[in-house]
Amino acid sequence: MALSSVKSLSMQQTPLGRPSFVNLDPKYKCLECRDVLRDAVQTLCGHRMCEECAFKVFEKSSPLRCPGNDETCVPTLKKEEIFRDPSARRETATLPVYCSNKDQGCTQEMQWKQLEEHILDCDFKSVQCVYEPNGCGIFTLKKNLEDHLQRCEYRKEPCFFCKDDVVIVHRQDHESMECRKILIDCPNGCGIAERPREDMKEHELDCPKRPFHCKFSNVGCDFTGSKEELEKHDQISFDHHLQLTTLYTASIDLQSMEIQRELQDISESRHNLKKTNDQCLQEVGSLREEMEVRKRAIKEIKLQSVALAERMIHMERRVEDCARKNTVEKQGRDLQGLRDGQINLSNRLTRLEQNGLYGGDRQSIGDNVAGILQNHDRQIGLMDIRLTELDLRLQIQETTSFNGVLLWKIRDYTRRKQEAKNGRTLSLFSQPFYTSQFGYKMCARVYLNGDGMGKGTHMSLFFVVMRGDFDNLLPWPFQQKVTMVLMDQDTGTNRLSDTFRPDENSNSFRKPQTEMNIASGCPVFVSHTMLETKTYLQEDTIFIKIEVDTNGINPP
């Protein structure tokens, strides 16, 4: 299978990762990256590269040479002459490698394809402590994990007092702040001691030494004391409390004024934002209407296909071989003249036979005339064949387009599609057409049963640049916009089309070095389900139109 098809069909046989090889034979190294072969492919001259490296080679400027660079190499490297190498892929997968945990002490060796499975159970791989959610950040070797777990300070053990599971490193904090059952003294110092924390909370509500806060604490008084002390404080701090209240009220008034100003600013901002929002809504509405119009006019752009693997067959129909109409008419007049001459000779022979001229020489004269007539018959037969051939070529010439537009009628759709399914005729080519009399030469190629990602489900349609007589006078690469259309035979309003502009870096649009360049187009142009409706298929016939934008082409 050629390189252009490998990318989509490649079987991933090379294992992942970059292991350390026990002894890597140079034959398993890529000629391009000098690393181990990954998904190996082979050139026509027998050299091997990674599949990805092979694609990168063709990103370089032409002409391309094989990286092997010896006398056995092909003169020019071509995509269609690079193939997948299943044998090398299998051999690469069995190369002996060291365990990835060699630096941690693992001494085992195994085949590359077995490395991933080995690493899952390797005793020397680094693993994280299972108590990581509790705060342990230790990584250790798998074989030492059990010992670590038994000593890890982030494992949980039951509290001595409340029996709740507590992380060992947090045990002291738990006992000093959270444990319900631990015995503690009254925090107010009332003399009650050694009660469980959960009972001490109830005691604090009725504790005679429970601290009380001044009822003016919300305006700034920070006094705290017993109930009796609080009453005395209220009596002697009346003026202080009044002063605090006045200051607090003044600050509240200032804050209120600030809030009013902020509310006014917010109101103005809200008004401006509402105004801006209304304008945005109007603009969004107009944009939405414009988008809807464009959606009705533009189809979703389809992805361009990857370059096809097959090379185009050679086309024999050439415009220069087509006879001019006046030549055919001249041949017809000559043929008619020969026929008239035959009739005259036949009449002369008849008169000679009737008159009996020349006596005994009558038989010889008849033989001579018969020979002449036979010679004329042969010439007339040859002229008939030549005239038929010229008629055919004239028909081809008369159907050739010189305005960049091809209208292709494909008859017997059902039979041709079945032949494509059976592998007999995978694709069909149209007659050539031109951007002008001395312009680019082009044709179309169709896969009725699909190609690549569209095989079996879609019709694939491609555009091909051909080698012409005036290529040396034309600008390259080919840069004209191409539109491919499936014609609507029902109402004429539901044409399916795909438009693309050539990629200047693609070999498909450079100056042809062979009869045809590699085709470019759409492998999923239209599904069989949609195509095989009366809209596009009638009387077992479909019509395909190719339009090439001829603007900007300066005639030679």
Image: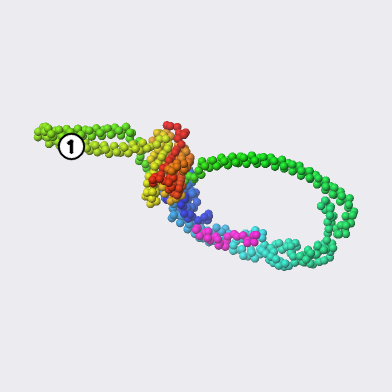
Coloration mode = rainbow
Residue at the outermost left position: 360
Residue nearest the viewer, comparing 211 with 508:
211
Residue nearest the viewer, comparing 134 with 302:
302
Residue at the outermost right position: 236
Residue drawn at 52 percent across, 55 percent down: 16
Give the secondary structure at mark 1: helix
* Residue 458 visible, this orientation: no
Horizontal side, residue 430 vs residue 115: left or right? left
- The boundaries of the magenta stretch are 112-133
Identify residue for label 1: 371
For disc 1, the neighbor class at 10 Å (few under 14, some 14 to 19, many from 20) is few
* Residue 415 visible, this orientation: yes
Residue nearest the viewer, comparing 227 with 126:
227
Residue drawn at 64 percent across, 64 percent down: 149
* Image coordinates for residue 147, horizontal then vertical, percent: 63, 65
* Image coordinates for residue 329, horizontal then vertical, percent: 30, 33
Horizontal side, residue 430 vs residue 381: left or right? right
Residue drawn at 82 percent across, 51 percent down: 219
Horizontal side, residue 348 vs residue 266: left or right? left
* Image coordinates for residue 331, horizontal then vertical, percent: 28, 34
Q: Is residue 450 above or below residue 142?
A: above
Residue 128 lies within the magenta run? yes
Residue at the outermost front position: 491
Horizontal side, residue 379 vs residue 522: left or right? left
Q: Is residue 212 above or below residue 276?
A: below
Residue 153 lies within the magenta run? no
Residue drawn at 46 percent across, 46 percent down: 525
* Image coordinates for residue 215, horizontal then vertical, percent: 84, 55
